[in-house]
Image (cartoon, grey):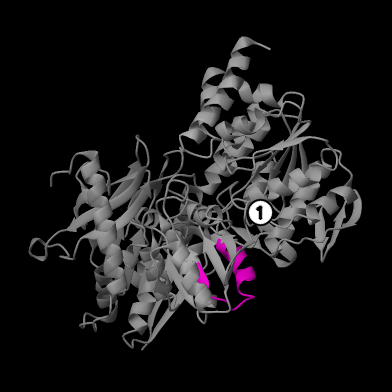
Amino acid sequence: MPIRRSLAMKSVGLVNQLSQKLGRGQGTVAGGRVGLAIDPHLLGDLTANKCVVLVSGTNGKTTTTALIASGLRTHFSNVATNDTGSNMPAGHVAALVDEEEAQAVVLEVDENYVPRLLETSNPAVITLLNLSRDQLDRMSEVRMLAQRWRDALSRTGGIHVVANADDPLVVYAAFSASEVTWVAGGLVWKEDAAGCPQCSGHIVFGKNETWACDSCDLARPEPTWTMKGNLVHSPLGAVHLNVILPGSFNRSNSLMALAAVTATGAEITKAARAISSVESVAGRFQHRRRPGQDARLMLAKNPAGWAALLEVVEESATPVVVSINSRTADGADPSWLFDVDFSSLRNRVVIVTGDRWRDLSVRLHYGGVDHSREADPEMAITRAANASDGTVDFIGNYTAFQEVTRARS
Amino acid sequence: MTLRIVAVYPDLLGTYGDTGNAEILGRRASWRGIDVDVLHASSADPLPRGDLYCLGGGEDGPQVLAAQRLKDDGTLRSALEEGAVVFAVCAGFQIVGNSFPDAQGTLHNGLGLLDVATRKGTGSRCVGEVVVEFDALEHGGLGLPLLTGFENHAGLTTLGPSARRLGQVRHGTGNGGGDSSEGAFQDRILGTYLHGPVLARNPALADLLLTWATGGGELQELDDSREIALREERLLSATRATNREGFARKP
């Protein structure tokens, strides 16, 4: 092993241990940064000779990554993944540095880092889920992202792209790749898709999820992977996929995951069974039970995420706690709250909390949703539980969600 | 008579949450017993006739498409000439001006309804909280309380002789043309770079637009305690940021 690489790898572990001891973080980023500074090619070294699957998109990255990891374990004896939520190169390095034995790797990738990962991590497969508005103050507008993905895919050959045929922006990005599997991955939120990414024409959505630009040739490619009820139709045959995770968006994530896993050569029936068995990913939809309360914890951090989640939340009548923060991982501008149709919460007990509860309160006021405010998120959950039989729906954006999932005890 | 508020092309100009401005105006009218209709006008359809049009922020490609459609459609110009009010934010603000840049910096003709021109900035994007002091009534300004919002743009806008600025930037960038101005207005058209959406944080501006659209009569007072709490928190946050940065821009 070259000395630089060896030194870089040792540093990752040491710095992460130090970072954890100092209580400065989960210890997944600092070490990775130091390692990459010592050896900029570290990610390429760590992924060499491994079957690498990448996952990106605005929503569903973490869940789909976990589903793919579960599916890959039916085919590879040792699978490494970044299940800590650190989805930039430093996090990738940290997740891989102690996984020399891994035969396969699945990495969740921040949308902005897709080109870099395509070029440096030796991927066999990349799964592209969807693109919609998200944290516009620190992320890019979605058409810029689609263009960058497209440019990177046309530069890097030999990568099998598993792409959502229902999202025009993803299709535009994936069209430049040499090998694409089109999946009917669904698109709940279409508000960012109307302007054609190829020609500035207008994307017109028709019946049965079809869509086409009215002034150029960009149109929905015919997906070879579709799902009707619990039955998946694919070039590898039909198979049942009984998804436990709630919501149509998780059925879509599962279908995308199955297509990606089988692209590595895994057997479809076993992979489908493994993907179906996943009950909770990184605390999402987890029931946090404490004496007198049962809180279902949910994450929604942008309009598309909310649109998908409301479909699940609408089914119950329990009190709802909504927590909105604007820390670094959340974005500083919660204007997007006005893109969420909260009207289905009108007859529920609603409590607002989080750093930006005032923005949320004004938004709900204009949406005709009565609500009250509680400064502390835990107190908000307790109060909501007291207003019902103890069951509560908690929905937070990124750091607001982390606050309650980490406060487990 | 029904007050008709039109959100213009939310499918192209709805990226930054500004469609909320139309909802806010609609609510503030209906709370006062004004018969109101809020329409979301898709870019696929002819633009309907309305009394108050709201345009929002959008991405570069869709912005070019929106400008082209509005020009071909012609309704916005004729409605303005017949006395309608136009409220335009960010990309919408640039579109109603004389010219605006696309992603490559190539200039496109705007609708020419507001005497401003936008070019692509050379530095980094202007992103963050903004505080603006409105020009006073006696100086031909609108004399409203401090304007608070969030900017996120790469374009730099300069004002022509027919347009007036909304006011002086106290925190943030605003128009970015080097004169510390933010926004512009001219007759019954008003543009700004600020999101939030801006009318959620600035009920006085919302009511000014409603007054223009309803013929100038006095509007009944509303309970704006939530909006005021939000305003105060955002203004304080911007002040703290200014102090951290170690300077406050001189007027």
Q: Chain of mark 1?
A: A
Comparing A145 with B122, the one in front is A145
Dot 1, how many residues are within 10 Å of its Cα: few (below 14), some (14-19), or many (20+)? many
Give me the residue at 55% from left, 39% from top: A112
- With A47 as the anchor, is A110 left or right in this view? left
Bounds of the magenta segment:
A306-321
Horizontal and vertical percent position of residue A68: 75, 45
Nearer to the camera, A31 or B152: A31
Q: Position of residue A79 (x, y in %)?
A: 76, 36
Q: Quadrant of the N terminus of chain A?
A: top right
Q: Is residue B202 magenta?
A: no
Q: Residue at x 49, y 70 (%)?
A: A382
Q: In which quadrant is the C terminus of chain A drawn?
A: bottom right
Task: Quickly name the residue at label 1.
Answer: A167
Residue A3 vertical placement versus B26 (above, below): above
A230 left or right, relative to A111: right
Q: Position of residue A259 (x, y in %)?
A: 80, 47
Quarter where residue B79 is shown: bottom left
| Residue A377 % position (x, y) | 45, 62
Q: Please, which residue is most extreme toward the left here?
A: B138
In the image, residue A194 sits, relative to residue B40, either above or below, namely above
Residue type marked 1: Asp
Q: Magenta span has A308?
A: yes
**Does the image show residue B64?**
yes
